[in-house]
Amino acid sequence: MNNIDDGTGKKESRIKLIRADSLGKFKWDYKQVGIGSSTGNFGSNDWTDSQLMMMLNPIDVVQAGWKATGKDYTIDNEGYVIDENGYKIYKNVGSYYNREKGYVPNKVSTTENFLETEVDFSTKGLTIESKNLIDKAKYYLGGTTNLNYNISTVKEHYNIERNKSEYKDNEISRTNEWTGYIGLMYPSDYGFATNKINCLTKYLYDYSTYTECYINNWLLDSDEIQWTISPYWSHRNVIINIYQNGGINNYGSDGYAIIHPVLYLKPDVKITSGNGTKENSFKLSL
């Protein structure tokens, strides 16, 4: 990918990797009304304080994101994330990044603390060798306010994701960018992953009718709904998702979908061996 910002304004060409095997099915966020950025009982589509983001990224990245968006959250000595009103909204930030046991995104309300359900990333999390090869990057959080047949080609989604105008309504605002190590794919990543050039002019929302597009797309999972990082701005808790039938649509953040973590390699990482096949995968090093 060209012109990838590392969060400081420095832009370079970098390799973007999407994990081939899913980590499993998780909620994107399930904070209820009055908790963090949630204004309803079905979570929030603000990636900067989503429970899923906290599960994937280390503490320093998570806290930097809060600071950049004006969220006065803290982490206590038991590992709980405490929001501005003193509610416990998550626990053990960065379990995937740190390759350890943690907790899945789960329900929390003003009458009950975060519901702890353990998840173990001690075999699926990032290794020390992997972390040495990656660096922070800016992820764009622009979202569409309308998914329909005539405004959702791959290139249009790419521009929507990078929309510089901040979303606002009468009660909330959403930032349009975030810097961190681990994100999720964009809808446009899915669109660009097909190997048919003419699919770039098709509508992602209606990809399910374009058989040649989705059956030739290596990011499609025909068995499970997949999360993206992109919000559906017509609702405060809805995310754009990739559906099993090949099309994209919206899905509430409190629902379950699979995740494929996304990251960027450092610019000077090189392929030192392998040919990229399953039997002889690429080996990377600095």
Image (cartoon, helix red, strand yellow):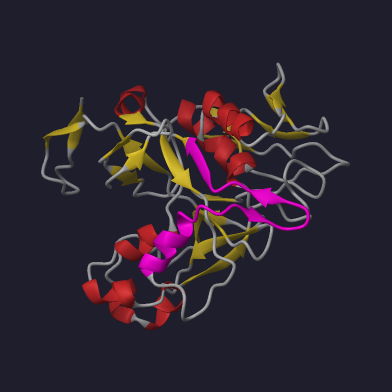
The answer to which quarter of the image holds residue 190 is bottom left
| Residue range of the region highlighted in magenta in the rendering | 154-179
| Between 119 and 212, the one nearer to me in the picture | 212
Q: Position of residue 21 (x, y in %)?
A: 37, 49
Q: Is residue 171 left or right of residue 281?
A: right
What residue is shown at x 42% (from left), y 30% (from top)? 8
Q: Position of residue 201 (x, y in %)?
A: 32, 76
Q: Position of residue 270 (x, y in %)?
A: 17, 32
Q: Is residue 54 above or below residue 1?
A: above
> Given the current orientation, which residue lies at the most extreme top position?
77
Q: Is residue 145 above or below residue 122?
A: below
| Between 205 and 273, the one nearer to me in the picture | 205
Residue 190: in sight, yes or no? Answer: yes
Q: Is residue 21 left or right of residue 284?
A: right
What residue is shown at x 48% (from left), y 63% (from top)? 224
- Asked whether residue 187 is drawn in magenta, I would say no
> Given the current orientation, which residue lies at the most extreme right position?
111
